[in-house]
Amino acid sequence: MLNKLGDTKILKKDFKYKIMQTFLKNIKALFIIMAIIFAIPSYVYLFNNKTLLNFDGNLEYCFLLTNNINRLYQAIIYTIIITIIVIIYFMIIKFRKQIFKNVNQIFIFITIVSSIFVFVVPFWCSDVFYYLGIGRLAEEYHQNPYYTDMKSFIDNNEINMEKDTVMQKGYKNYWAKTTVVYGAVWTIICSIISFLSLGRLELGLLIFKIINLLIHIGNCYLLFKISKKKVFPILYGLNPFILIEGIANVHNDLFVIFFLLLSLYQLLNKKSIISCLLYLALATDIKYFTILFLPFIIIYYYKNQDIKTRIINCIKFGSLFILFVIIPYIVFFKDFRIFMGLLTQRERIAKGLYLFISEYFNNPPGLTEYIKTIALAIFTVIYFNTCVSLLFSKTIIFSKQMKIVYLFLLAFIFLLITNFQPWYFIWLSPLMIWQNSKNIKLIIQMQLLTLYANIVFLINSENFRYGVPFFMIFVFGILICIIKNNKNRTIYIRRNKFE
């Protein structure tokens, strides 16, 4: 009798093992199938319409890209698909050693999955049409986009836009009446892509997406080269949040991360401070937040020098970095109005803490601005004191400094940015390398939570008043994840020393 019970248990275990092995053999195919299912509405829309010219704000945040189906039903379908993809993603992370025999298999699979999202219509954000528009404005019409906005130029000039569908689409964009809100390097990149587009919207978008795909794969490669761990390309490269926001929605944050990773690679692997600062300047010339890394990089590079030498080198190489940042602006500079677009973006309030304050607690008037000023002052003081303390520190460990930068970056996103957007959490991806397992898991969870918080917009529309419930769902989800992570074990990653 005991032998029969023992045999039954063994058979059950053997049966479960066979099922699991079968599942793991097919899990890559299942991920690809779900990615295709996610992309099907885009394929159908493009097949029926043949163009994106009429893709307007009414279809933004419509998952099935049609108003003929109730938005709640669309949101439910989206939630089911995304949840299945997320579950598969975590299963791949957990059983990565059984699924991938070598790093080449990882990169091949990332490339295949990512390529599917190239053909997903950017239904969550129309910024790419603004990117193409400002590039076209500069390249074809020889206008300086830091002083002339698309809408004013088109309204005040007789422009034949029948064949220039890039400008037609850019004219309808939310940012069309705003001068450039990004750094000079990004405007140059947009001009090159717009030149290649020949004024054709679909061609321009396809080129943009293919370049973003290549940048995405480059980011995976750099994460692997810096960390020397196969898990990081998987965590980043197959992350549904990155695939949707970075490739489907074509956000320029992938470029920022690419140059930032190149900078860190030059610092840690090549030990070259000049090329490191050059790449960091290129990143800063797209989005300025990367300047937060500057003092940590220079001080780390000269960690074995005496205090006086460190200070001299901070001044010398800090000045060199500023020079690198300024050079691309020479192409566009006329006067200091060149920075007006950056200020315009900073003044916009969307989705985050400041929208919550302005909607429910903005009494007396101006409270939002007052809190923002105090937050900036506190952040600046703490950041400055941290850098000074590091400058005089006897022991400087890069991994510890990157943990500090991670906290500063979180504070920057949540407390200093009024124009809070989900895709800003792409910025945290490079810092995963130096975090403990719980923080790595939390970064991924924060990124994925934005996909679920966006359901608010899927059900309703992209209107600023829905930004508050979006933010509440997001923050509440983060708190649950933090509590749960402190109770449960997380993925253990054996790490190398990066010193």
Image (cartoon, rainbow, N blue to C red):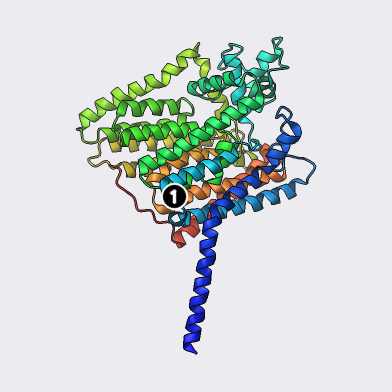
The image position of residue 471, as x and y in percent, is 60, 45
Residue most extreme to the left = 306
Residue 353 seen:
no
> Looking at the figure, which quarter contains the C terminus?
top left
Q: Residue furthest right?
A: 68
Rendered residue at 70%/51% (across/down):
76
Instruction: Please tell me which residue lies in front, 316 or 415.
Output: 316
Badge 1 element: helix
Residue drawn at x 61%, y 49% is 33
As drawn, is 157 to the left or to the right of 380?
Answer: right
Direction from residue 166 to residue 320 in the image, left or right: left
Is residue 491 visible to the viewer in this orientation of the structure? yes
Residue 328's place in the image compared with 4, above or below, is above
Query: How far from the left and from the top, in percent, is residue 435?
Result: 39, 48
Kindly indicate the quadrant of the structure image that contains residue 379.
top left
> What is the count of numbered marks?
1
Residue where numbered disc 1 is placed: 440
Three-letter residue code for mark 1:
Ile
Query: At 25% across and 28% down in the image, what residue appears?
Result: 311
